[in-house]
């Protein structure tokens, strides 16, 4: 079973920003009981002014927590980035939209759930509506249970369509192609090879805004 979890954050720069020249996204995570905790690492380069010939680096770390309902098992769960968009909404604020996909969720057997429910009745506890609760370290909020999607569903197009199902990365990078990018400059930036990029990406017709998976 898969579940899609969206995040949206506005990140403030300490200086004025004229243009984002390059940007990439990494993430780390760990699973403890029914809590998934991790960090988005957003980094890249930007120009201070339109006329500037120099670029300055930036790096932001955005923590996240995802609380999964107890009716799910997380023993085999994996967390990957499903999609990533960004927008410089003014000269100080970078808005990022990140969608995570939690895969290999397993529902506990009905007998096990019934035993837990029976214990709740014996303790005269109020019934709790089962749902997926999303929380973050920056704010506490609840959202409706995220609808499960089929692995073959056409409604969700993961940027990892070319990835081997038996292969997983806890840490990797997503590079968004900018105007001055070339295959050679991307290879040099991430210290990788063309063959590694071709494993997960189609390099024949790169366009501005395309997303490249860069294995770490």
Image (spheres, rainbow, N blue to C red):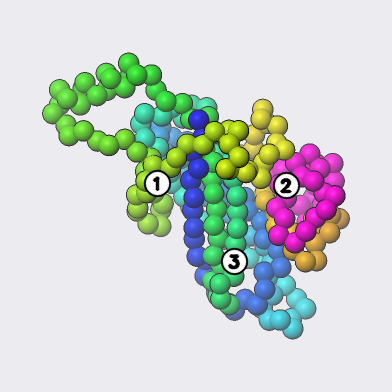
> What residue sits right under mark 1 in the picture?
134
- The Cα–Cα distance between marks 2 and 3, rounded to whole angstroms, is 21 Å
> What residue sits right under mark 3 in the picture?
87
Q: Is residue 196 magenta?
A: yes
Q: What residue appears at the point 73 percent right and 47 percent down from the top-left corner? A: 214
From the viewer's perspective, is 45 left or right of 95? right
Q: Is residue 135 above or below residue 120?
A: below
Return the disc, 2 or 1, that comes first in the chain's sequence.
1
Report the quarter where the C terminus lies. top right
* Element at label 1: strand
Q: Give residue 8's position: percent from left, percent from top.
A: 49, 58
User: In the image shown, does 79 or 152 lie closer to the viewer?
Assistant: 152
Magenta part of the chain: 187-216
Q: Give residue 172's position: percent from left, percent from top.
A: 66, 45
Q: Which residue of the protein is positioned furthest toward the bottom in this rendering?
A: 51
Q: Are marks 2 and 3 in contact (CB under 8 Å)?
A: no
Q: Tell me if residue 167 can be seen.
A: yes
Q: Is residue 165 above or below residue 135?
A: above
Q: Which residue of the protein is positioned furthest toward the top in this rendering?
A: 111
User: In the image shown, does 55 or 91 lie closer to the viewer?
Assistant: 91
Mark 2 vs mark 1, foreground winner is: 1
- The Cα–Cα distance between marks 2 and 1, rounded to whole angstroms, is 28 Å
- The Cα–Cα distance between marks 1 and 3, rounded to whole angstroms, is 24 Å
Crowding around mark 1 (Cα neighbors within 10 Å: few <14, some 14 to 19, many 20+) is many
Crowding around mark 3 (Cα neighbors within 10 Å: few <14, some 14 to 19, many 20+) is few
Q: Give residue 148's position: percent from left, percent from top.
A: 47, 36
Q: What residue appears at the point 77 percent right and 45 percent down from the top-left corner? A: 201
* Element at label 2: strand
> What residue sits right under mark 2 in the picture?
214
From the viewer's perspective, is 169 left or right of 103? right
Q: Give residue 132's position: percent from left, percent from top.
A: 38, 40
């Amino acid at each position: 079973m898969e579940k899609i979890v969206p995040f949206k954050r506005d990140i403030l720069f300490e200086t004025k920003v004229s243009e984002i020249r390059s940007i990439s996204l990494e993430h780390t995570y760990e699973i403890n009981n029914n809590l998934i905790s991790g960090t988005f690492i957003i980094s890249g380069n930007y120009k201070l002014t339109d006329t500037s010939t120099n670029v300055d680096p930036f790096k932001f770390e955005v923590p996240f927590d995802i609380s999964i309902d107890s009716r799910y098992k997380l023993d085999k769960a994996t967390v990957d980035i499903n999609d990533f968009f960004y927008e410089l909404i003014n000269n100080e604020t970078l808005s990022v939209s990140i969608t995570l996909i939690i895969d290999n969720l397993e529902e506990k057997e009905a007998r096990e759930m019934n035993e837990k429910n029976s214990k709740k009745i014996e303790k005269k506890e109020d019934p709790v509506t089962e749902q997926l609760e999303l929380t973050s370290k920056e704010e506490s909020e609840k959202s409706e249970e995220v609808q499960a999607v089929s692995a073959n569903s056409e409604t969700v197009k993961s940027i990892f369509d070319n990835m081997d199902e038996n292969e997983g990365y806890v840490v990797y990078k997503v590079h968004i192609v900018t105007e001055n990018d070339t295959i050679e400059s991307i290879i040099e930036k991430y210290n990788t090879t063309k063959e590694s990029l071709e494993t997960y990406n189609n390099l024949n017709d790169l366009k501005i805004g395309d997303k490249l998976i860069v294995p770490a």
